[in-house]
Image (spheres, coloured by chain):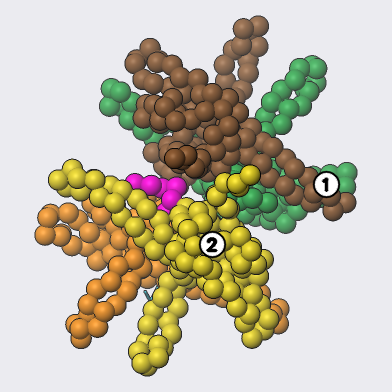
Chain colours: A orange, B yellow, C green, D brown, E cyan, F blue
Amino acid sequence: MSNLRNSVRLVGHLGNEPEVKKTANNKTLARVSIATNSSYKNEKGEKIEETQWHNLIMWDNNAKLAEKYLRKGSEISIEGRLSSRSYTDNSGVKKYITEIIVNEILLLDKKKD
Amino acid sequence: MSNLRNSVRLVGHLGNEPEVKKTANNKTLARVSIATNSSYKNEKGEKIEETQWHNLIMWDNNAKLAEKYLRKGSEISIEGRLSSRSYTDNSGVKKYITEIIVNEILLLDKKKD
Amino acid sequence: MSNLRNSVRLVGHLGNEPEVKKTANNKTLARVSIATNSSYKNEKGEKIEETQWHNLIMWDNNAKLAEKYLRKGSEISIEGRLSSRSYTDNSGVKKYITEIIVNEILLLDKKKD
Amino acid sequence: MSNLRNSVRLVGHLGNEPEVKKTANNKTLARVSIATNSSYKNEKGEKIEETQWHNLIMWDNNAKLAEKYLRKGSEISIEGRLSSRSYTDNSGVKKYITEIIVNEILLLDKKKD
DNA sequence: TTTT
DNA sequence: TTTT
């Protein structure tokens, strides 16, 4: 792993429940989307809110943590690496997707007593 | 700008000459691809080399720096934010692309005397 | 500012109320300590909790944000740069101190309704 | 290890040869100083160059890499965590020091053929 | 599709 | 001096 060559850090809220499954070689995989919100002023000085969605991939211990603790709406911070790949969809069209392979997860939701 | 919510750092070599142009509202825009290399051991213990390509977007001063100093093969480090968008290609197909809007560039090539 | 050459990111809780003052040239300065907690297993396999304390320096808008929103116990995330300096204490002894000049602050406490 | 709670990234040149030794429990430890340079404009608009020095601590594989490849003047990028501790110097005075425990090293010097 |  |  080279953290210094390819590293992403995000803070945001999950848009769905993590989808967890076992792969053929018995590894645990979780997928979930995360939204990051930012605001900036456009050329007219109006405040623009922008939401970006990112695809997170979690393996093994991170996937298990996701299954146990992460829910739709959870706020988390993650560190991972960018990974792009292509696949052929059901209609036979080649598609490209960029995902973030998560190395570390920090839960930001406060526990309720 | 929220650096803490959405931040990418990459170190790698450029795959092409930066394409620089002026936008309609007279801003300078540069596009260039960067490759990040990493290696890991697979389940058989073999060393696997993996190259990832990323799309960089540079505006204004960063674009001018790119035009002046960056060449195919240049090694750089960048910090930016992830941004995904869709567009319709020439055949009318909707496509998705993930790009990195660059905030800062560090040149890693050594000067020659 | 070179974010790529010297960058620190911390997530933790504040150990005191921010101390805010005006400097001679009318800039606002806030100082506050932040604790980062981590745990690791020692050679006997025992879980060890370790707390590190860091000195944060905030200027102007960040200092005003600190004065308004940050309290003892607040959880925040920051990005900044490492800066070390020496000074002479009241007994005439030369001392060294390392501080983090904060560029960006993210509040992690949840609002209560 | 919590990379998300306490993380430092530096790019700079080493100020000395790494000092490498074995600890009592047979681990390899290397110490070396790194300088980071930045420039900013002061209130008079003058460009000010500022050099900061940081203390790096490398253990085991990182220490061995340092011994083998790092020299005075080498340019590297590192990722690590901030750690402060106190010790009593030869004159019996209590001193404080902030160090960076290095997790990862990237060599930026170009190989010569 | 999240959240403020 | 924080917090879990």
**What's the mark number on residue B16?**
none
Q: Which residues are magenta?
A: A1-7
Q: How many marks?
A: 2
Q: Quick check: D46 left or right of D35?
A: right
Under tag 2, what secondary structure? loop
Q: Residue at x 65, y 70 (%)?
A: B60
Using the image, name the chain to which the residue with label 2 belongs: B
Choose top left, top right, bottom left or bottom right for residue C50: top left
Q: Quick check: B39 left or right of A39?
A: left
- Specify few, some or many for label 1: CA neighbours under 10 Å numbering under 14, 14-19, or 20 or more: few
Choose top left, top right, bottom left or bottom right for residue C107: bottom right
Using the image, name the chain to which the residue with label 1 belongs: C
Q: Residue at x 39, y 79 (%)?
A: B96
The picture places residue D21, in percent across and down from the top left corner, at 43, 16
- Specify few, some or many for label 2: CA neighbours under 10 Å numbering under 14, 14-19, or 20 or more: some
Q: Is residue D36 above or below residue D42?
A: above
The picture places residue A33, in percent across and down from the top left corner, at 36, 68
Tell me, yes or no, if residue C39 can be seen here.
yes
The picture places residue A9, in percent across and down from the top left corner, at 46, 56
Look at label 2 and name its amino acid: Arg
Q: Residue at x 88, y 47 (%)?
A: C25
**What's the mark number on residue B71?**
2
Magenta stretch, main secondary structure, is loop
Q: Measure the C-alpha gap from mark 1 to mark 2.
A: 47 Å
Front one among E3 and A103 = A103
Look at label 1 and name its amino acid: Lys
**What's the mark number on residue C22?**
1
Q: Quick check: C103 left or right of A105?
A: right
Is there one chain holding both mark 1 and mark 2?
no
Instruction: Say if the magenta span includes residue D96.
Output: no
Q: Is residue C98 above or below residue A26?
A: above
Front one among D72 and C73 = D72
